[in-house]
Every structure is written in C-alpha cells, then in structure tokens.
Amino acid sequence: QWCVELKSLKLYINSYRDKGVFHEDVTNIIMDDLIKLLDPQEIEVVGDFNVRGNIKTIVRANHIKKR
C-alpha cells in the first residue's frame, strides 16, 4: 500500500550524520518515524554503523503491532 522512496530515505538517514546522538537512539527514532508513516503490522530496523574508535556497531529495533 505504501512505498518509501530510496532517495528520500537516504536523505532522511543522512540528516543524522552530524547530530550528536547515540546509535541506539537514532535506530529507535527512525523506527518510530517509519511506524508513524507506514503503520506496519511488523517492522525491524537495523542500524549498521561504520567503525569508529575500532568498534563496529549493529543495532536492531523490532516492533509488532498489538491487536
């Protein structure tokens, strides 16, 4: 029913590039925004962040709509 344009999604994600925010927070904010926009039954957002300070970070956020 809904489609998120890849270029728009890329620009949205890149808007977090210079903000002082934790990886976990960014992943949850993105998931919350997608839930508001799409109202999905189920969603998983995976934040796969580049290495900084020799640490690779992968954050997963899941949501299942209550019935």
Image (cartoon, helix red, strand yellow):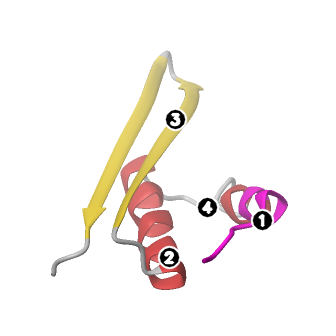
Front: mark 2 or 1: 1
Left or right placement of residue 41 versus residue 17 in this view:
left
Provide the residue span drawn in magenta: 1-10
Q: CA distance from mark 3 to mark 1?
A: 20 Å
CB contact under 8 Å: marks 3 and 2:
no
Report helix, strand or loop for mark 2: helix
The x, y position of residue 41, in whole percent, is 34, 71
Give the residue type at disc 1: Glu
Three-letter residue code for mark 4: Lys
Residue 32 lies left or right of residue 12; in this view the side is left
Give the Cα distance between marks 4 and 1: 23 Å
Q: Quadrant of the N terminus?
A: bottom right
Residue 33, x across and y down, in percent: 50, 76
Question: What residue is disc 1 on?
Answer: 5
Q: Residue at x 25, y 74 (%)?
A: 65
The quarter holding residue 15 reads: bottom right
Mark 2: give few (<14), some (14-19) or many (20+) Cα within 10 Å: few
Name the residue tied to disc 3.
48
Judged left or right of residue 42, residue 27 is right
Q: Residue at x 51, y 22 (%)?
A: 53
Dot placed on the residue nearer the N-terminal end, 3 or 2? 2
Please report whichever mark, 4 or 1, sits nearer to the chain's N-terminal start. Answer: 1
Residue hosting label 4: 19
